[in-house]
Image (cartoon, rainbow, N blue to C red):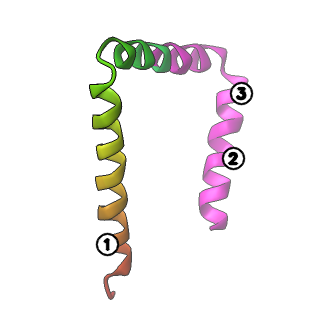
């Protein structure tokens, strides 16, 4: 847990101090939202299904014995 939190913390810190990276990320997220709005509501349904299947895979792999 500490490793994940520290990884996101360092990523967030780098994101905060790098204006070029921040601009690229916000631009890409904006393009993604615009594209989803063009194909709504089907894109939202596909996004929901993608999140659902990703959760199923992660829970299945997390429950396996090591």
- The residue that mark 3 highlights is 16
Q: Is residue 14 above or below residue 20?
A: below
Helix, strand or loop under label 3: helix
In primary-sequence order, the first of circles 2 and 3 is: 2
35 over 1 or under it: above or below: above
Residue at screen point 72% across, 25% down: 17
Q: Is residue 54 magenta?
A: no
Residue 9 badge: 2
Mark 2 to mark 3: distance in Å?
A: 10 Å
Mark in front: 1 vs 2:
1
Percent of width and height locating residue 43 = 30, 27
Question: Residue tagged by mark 1?
Answer: 61
Label 2 environment density (alpha carbons within 10 Å; few <14, some 14–19, many ≥20): few
User: Is tag 1's residue or tag 2's residue first in the polypeptide sequence?
Assistant: 2
Number of the front mark, 1 or 3 = 1
Tell me the magenta residue range.
1-28
């Amino acid at each position: 847990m500490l490793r994940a939190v520290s990884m996101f913390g360092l990523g967030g810190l780098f994101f905060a101090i790098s204006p070029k990276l921040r601009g690229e990320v916000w631009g890409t997220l904006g393009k993604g939202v615009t594209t989803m709005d063009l194909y709504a509501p089907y894109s939202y349904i596909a996004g929901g299904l993608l999140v659902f299947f990703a959760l199923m895979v992660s829970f299945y792999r997390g429950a396996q014995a090591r």
